[in-house]
Image (cartoon, rainbow, N blue to C red):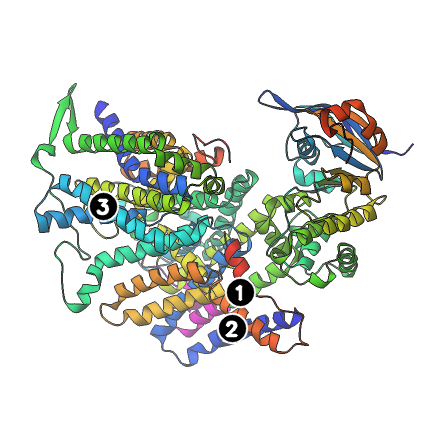
Amino acid sequence: MLEVLFIGLSLGSILLLVALGLAITYGAMGVINMAHGEMVMVGAYVTVLSGIWLGTNIFVAIPLAFIVTALLGLLIERVVVRRLYGRLLDTLLATWGIAILIQQAVRLEFGLTFLGIHIQGLGPGLQNVAVPPFLQGTFSILGADINRYRTFIILVTAFLALMTWFIIYRTAIGTQVRAIIRNPKMAAACGIDVTRVNALTFAFGSGLAGVAGVMMSGFKTVFPDMGTSMVVDGFLVVVMGGVGSLLGSVLSAGILGEINGLVAAATNDILARAVVFGVVIAIIVLKPKGLFALKGR
Amino acid sequence: MPMKRRIDWAIYAAFVVLVMFLPLVMDAFWLNRVAKYLVFGMLGTAVALSWGYAGILNLGQGLFFGAGAYMLAMSLKLASTTSLQQGSDKPVPDFMLWNAEPGAPTELCCINKASFLWLPFQSQWFGVAMGLILPVVLATILGTIVFRKRISGVFVSIITLALVLLVRLVVIDSQPVTNGFNGLTDLGWFNIAGLEFDPYIVPTYYLVAVSLSLVLVGARLLIDTRAGLILQAVRDDQNRARYLGFDVPAYQTFFFAVSAAIAGFAGMLYVIVSEFASPTFMDLTFSITMVVWAAVGGRSSILGACIGAILINTISATVSETEGFAEAWKAIIGLIFVLVVLYLPRGLAGLAHDFIDRLLARKPAASPQPLRVSDASSQLAE
Amino acid sequence: MAQAALTIDGLSVDFAGFKAVNGVTMTVDDGELRVLLGANGAGKTTLMDLISGKTKSTDGRVYLHDTDITNWEEHKIARAGIGRKFQIPSVFKELTVRRNLEVASCRKPGVFANLRFGFGAEAERNVDEVLELIGLTEEQDRIAAYLSHGQTQWLELGLLITQNPKIILLDEPTAGMTQAETHKTSEIVNNLKGRHTIIVVEHDMAFVREIAERITVLHLGQVLAEGNVEQIENNPKVREAYLGSKGIS
């Protein structure tokens, strides 16, 4: 039983890992970033490439991936997203186009394939990342075998969630972000540079996705399409938790992870995912604002 | 406005004539391909109806397409030569046999626990009827719940998206009755009064072409009705419509269901021309791709969205013939999509309308000052 | 004595302990034009929300003539004969002005009854008249999104007139208008007097003078006073609570 609960926790932490960035970009900025999954994918590829070309492990990849995806996010915000604020569904559509572009860029090795140049680690194939030995295998608590790497993910996720909470609720820029969540026009009228804060927020959310990608690469095969299903899961977590509520995202990720783990243990993975979708639909229908809706607005 | 309306209908007529004449210039292989694209065109129309006119961005249109496809495919599977005892009154699909428990009776009623569901599908027309009824019933139930609760905008999109993925998983998991991941393949041919619709013959093309024409004209007439106008009013301002006394959820649900029926119809036609039904119809990517077609063609144009779908698919097919260019084309589609959302929110149809407006403006007596809508609609696009 | 068009009896709403409207009782006669006055937070808009069904009351009843319409669904209340104009003008922005009015002219609430073409010659004539009345005949083929703020307000009034309800609720119909626009609005509203029963929430005193017959003053969710302009101006309680010592200025 403990093992099952642990797996649920682990699944929940993976959901949260992806959802954290979305909770920020969607919750704070009202942007449905369908390319978020691709940010995760890019983060995973940063791990692959840094492993191959620099010979470094995932600990080096974490800051590297954060920087790369944050910059990519900044670029996307500057070029596309900023023209679409206030048009929620259009951000969804435009970022879907961006998602395809990023996928194809990786698959076609930035177009270099057409010149006959190949970069090891890119391309349409599958990539795998080796995890440092001390994160491999299991250890045992109360007779239950606990996977070391999954524990590592849970710890990293908890750290990132706390860091995000700290930034949003305990720093000056976080106060500005929260002001924008509540009322962008009023925030601007109070002298907050909304464009700048939005750009930084988007970059930060994207950077979190990059870190998520590094973590994913340790236990999942890395390939160009890997992000597509993740972004959906991430959104379901955020919407179920209540848009704009960080705590809501954390709790709904935990709940969905445990449901997934328990149902999977009783039946199979496919049905478990189906049940998760069912739960999310039911909750959105019953409480469209999510479990922990932000009051006001 | 009557002048504009006449031009509109002239364009519809031109499109239908063009589609009807294609068999004169195309070989069987391409005709079959184009038939598929016409089916996609029908999907584009379904999306435009719910997105452009009802303001409901359904990211799970694949659910209705898949439902229609599976319903007819079940009938055609029973009619297939690959089914055991095909032609008799008790055929059994081959995959059920492969998956059967040892000792299970080889009869459709009871080869596995749920196989009895297939029994009525021995009649092809039952399959056809269900192909429309199931999407409509699903859409009506979903619409009634969601719209009565006044859920709107992105929440509807997320619910529809989660639902299509849910159903996809259930279909995959129900291996004994649906053949899971593999879907239903090796189907028999659709048959009307002895005429077998081999996917590669001209009558099959016409079956699709005529169906599409009817759907286009029907959808266009529907939005020209009072109800169609009120629907657009609901899209613009639900509350205003409600306080004028309209039963808002009824309008949303009705048109949502019509859109579902069109998608289900398209699903059936797709099964006829491509001879399979698969869970990929309910992939996230496919449902969003439909939205891409509609956006490029024009989200609030019945014909525009249809042409968008046909155009994108035809270009994809042509381009993909060049070795290695298929993947690059996908990237180009992604780019086009970003550009359309940013700079052409009304799609190709918007361009066409502006062009017509400009032509009409040259003849000052023809109509009162024509309007340029592009700026407003980009502001109002949400 | 004229017949009562709208009877409100002890109407209250409780928002988690806060009574925005608290035991309001009032009667509006057929064909009367009633102005609701009150400071911000006095409960004027909430009272309109309660009458039109936007907010559900926790106590009390609302009668339209003899029909109890308390807490019906909005569209049913609208069908029963209560039309409402919002504070923030709301029209169908992507439809032309004429199309907007055609929608409002439609008498049937359901989908299936409306699966037919055209609105009939009579409805179109009616639309023409309303266009004339609200002064938008020239603009009838414009998309509503392009109208000026004042024109949008008039179009929404036009929607109400076309809808032809027994009672019209107007929530600050002159908000954000220039003086000239306000004057034209009062002409439109005066034109409706007698044909419809009208309840107006308004702050603009010049406008109130132009249109008012009877005034009900709300204060902290309760009825403070009722009477004609002169009586209200001279009512000491009203002066204290709302008007200040200078009276209606």
Q: Which residue is mark 1?
A: B216
Residue sitting at x 71%, y 33%:
C51
Query: Is there any visible trace of residue B100 in the rendered image?
Result: no
* Stretch in magenta: B185-210
Quadrant the N terminus of chain B occupies = bottom right
The magenta stretch spans residue B204: yes
Q: Which residue is mark 3?
A: A67
Query: Is there any visible trace of residue A116 in the rendered image?
Result: yes
Left or right of C195? Residue B128 is left
Q: Identify the chain of the residue marked 3, using the numbered disc in the image.
A: A
Crowd band around label 2 with a 10 angstrom C-alpha radius: few (<14), some (14–19), many (20+): some
Q: State how far apart marks 2 and 3 are (Cα).
A: 54 Å
Mark 1 residue type: Leu
Mark closer to the observer (1, 3): 3
Left or right of A33? Residue A261 is left
Question: Does dot 2 land on a helix, a strand or a loop?
Answer: helix
Q: Which residue is mark 2?
A: B16
